[in-house]
Amino acid sequence: MNRAWMDRFIDTIEWIAAGFVGIVALNIFVGVLLRNTLNYAIPDSFDIGRMLLGILIFWGIAATSYRGGHITVDLVWANVGPKYQRMIDVFATLVLLFVVTVQTWTLFDKVRTTYNDNVLTFDMHMPTWPFFAIAWAGDGAAVLLIAIRTYRLIFHPEDIHDAKVKTVE
């Protein structure tokens, strides 16, 4: 795979996740502002906010999965040599790839059943399946990014951009 293409893809996923953070923040800000100044509630703001948070979580999984920005326990990893550290990284990433792939499969079933059951929001009767589909797309992006991370860990470990975090030993 072309390295520059993969890096652009990774950056795009991270920007999409950041965009959803902004959308969730804007939704909350506007809802609170209207409620406190004009005593007006946006119709379906609770349902929309809840579904946007779900979208944010799944796109956040995609953004943190590649960079290694999620919470890790490095007790064993920190006390072994580089060869074993790489083996642990590959094993852990393969387990993560398996788990997120299964999660993506089951979330697709949720999108399908929500669409087939015609689940709607309470006030405006908007279909909810598009929100679930966007969340599913984030989970699918996570699978792709974890696959790229696995590929790079095995064949090009120098291309991994792990988050640099201060560890306590």
Image: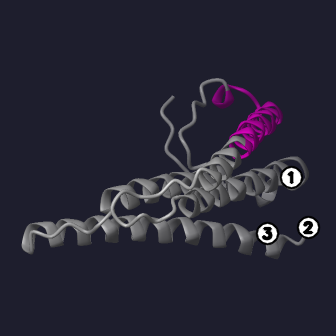
Residue assigned mark 2? 1
Label 3: which residue?
6
Q: Are marks 1 and 2 in contact (CB under 8 Å)?
A: yes
Neighbour tally class for label 3: few under 14, some 14-19, many 20 plus, Cα within 10 Å = few
Q: Position of residue 27 (x, y in %)?
A: 33, 68
Task: Determine whether 58 is above or below 105 in the image.
Answer: below
| Residue 97 belongs to the span the image colors magenta | yes
Residue at screen point 45% across, 56% down: 51
Report the amino acid beneath label 1: Tyr
Tag 2 near tag 3, CB within 8 Å: yes
Q: How many marks?
A: 3
Query: On the image, which quarter does residue 43 sit in?
Result: bottom left
Query: Residue flagged by tag 3: what amino acid is it?
Result: Met
Above-or-below relation of 138 to 165:
below
> In the image shown, does 8 or 17 lie closer to the viewer?
17
Kindly report the distance in space between the C-alpha atoms of the residues bearing marks 1 and 2: 10 Å
Going from N to C along the chain, the mark reached first, 3 or 1, is: 3
Do we see residue 163 in this rendering?
Answer: no
- Give the residue at mark 1: 151
Q: Earlier in the sequence, mark 1 or mark 2?
A: 2
Q: Which residues are magenta?
A: 77-105
Q: Tell me the number on the disc at residue 75.
A: none
Q: Is residue 167 magenta?
A: no
34 lies left or right of 85: left
